[in-house]
Structures are given as structure tokens and as C-alpha cells.
Amino acid sequence: MKKTLEEGKFAHIVGTFDLHNATGTIDYVTPVAVGAVSSAGTPTKLRLVGEGMAGEEFDMPVHPQRNSCAPDGETGTFEEYVPVTPGLTVVKLMVGDTVAAEYRRGDDVPSPPIALAGASPDKPYKLLLQAAAQPTSGVTYSVQARPDTSSSWMTLAVGLEVANSEVNVNQFPGAKEIEVRVLRTDGFSETEVLRQTKTF
């Protein structure tokens, strides 16, 4: 199986399959800007199908990953990159004609207000992120921080149903400023919903 790196809008999808029972899971979906895209290869009974409001957007074979002791086994895992368009709403894992699992784009609702509180007297080494909201179906948040001593973001939390988290400033020795951002994802796209800088 040949894979090539391509730039664009993709979703990285990881899951499991059971060909005998026609079942499976989609465990992990995240938007990425570079995808390892598989060549078309031979059609298989294991496929990922993308659908939108206008109908089917793609139907691509899944290249299974199996235990080396059972290269032809009925169960295993998979990892694929699928193209994402603004209209994509659901990705289905198909085993033959059976829908084994599906992932639906998170609900399109406004992001709730998120507050970043400065260090308090009882927790001088922490910044607190607090969001006044309930979880939204299919939507998660990640938290990243970047000190003034670095040009790279450090991921501190992923998969948060609500953007409540803590930033321990002791992770950044020597920093006089720390920039914090919160990213919201519906699985197919990602949006920055907060960026603030705290000075010490």
C-alpha cells in the first residue's frame, strides 16, 4: 500500500473492525492540514463513506492493520485520512453493506464565553480556564500554551467536553509571559475560540 503526503483539509480517523461480525468503531477523529493519503488500491468490503447535505462525498477503501501473527485475521485496526469539505456531515465505516460505525460532525452552535483567570493568591503557579456551558454533542476542546521563551505551542489538554482546565506556569521556567489558546473542534474542522496573554 502506497501513501503520499498531501496538504489540504483532512480528518484523521482511527478505529477498529470485525469483518466476521460486520462491526467496528470509529474511536478518534481530528482535523489536520496534512494527510497521508492512500492510493486507491483494490476495492475491499471495508470502506469509509462520507456523506453531506448534497449526498455522498467519498467512498474509499480502508487499508486494515492486523496483528503480524494473523495477517489475514478478521479483526484489527485502521488509520485513514479522509477529505473534508464544508458540507461533510457524517463519515460511516462500512463492512460490506452494513454500517458498522459512524461519526457525525459536532453541533454547530456558538462557542460559550471562556474566561482565563490570573494566578490567585492560593494558587500563584496556576492559571484557570473556565467556560460557562454544558457539553455540546460532537464538540471537544483542546488547550495549548506558549511561553515567551519559545515559538512552539505546547498541548496541555485534549478532548475536553467543556473548556475547563488549568495551566501550571511552573512548566515554563524563566517565562515572563505565557500565551494561552483554546481550540474548538467538531471532528472535521478546528476553530480558535480564545487567545490571551498573561504577564508575570
Image (cartoon, rainbow, N blue to C red):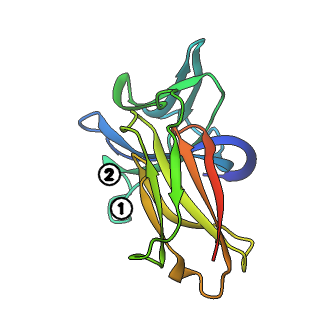
Coordinates of residue 190 in the picture (x, y in percent): 61, 43
Instruction: Kindly give the residue lying farthest to the front in the view shown.
Output: 121
Note whether residue 12 is visible. no
The one of 66 and 37 positioned closer to us in this rendering: 37
Tell me which residue sits at (72%, 53%) in the image: 5
Residue at the farthest top position: 54
Q: Is residue 67 above or below residue 169?
A: above
Furthest toward the left, the residue is 21
CB under 8 Å between discs 1 and 2 = yes
Vertical order, 105 against 123 (above or below): above
- Measured as percent of width and height from the top left, residue 55 is found at 56, 13
**What's the amino acid at mark 1?**
Asn
Observer able to see residue 1:
yes
Q: Earlier in the sequence, mark 1 or mark 2?
A: 1
Q: Amino acid at mark 2?
A: Gly
Disc assigned to residue 67 = 1
Side (left or right) of 173 relative to 163: right
Nearer the observer, 69 or 48: 48
Q: In the visual, does 146 lie left or right of 45?
A: right
Q: Which residue is mark 2?
A: 73
Dot 1: within a 10 Å radius of its alpha carbon, few (fewer than 14), some, or many (20 or more) residues? few
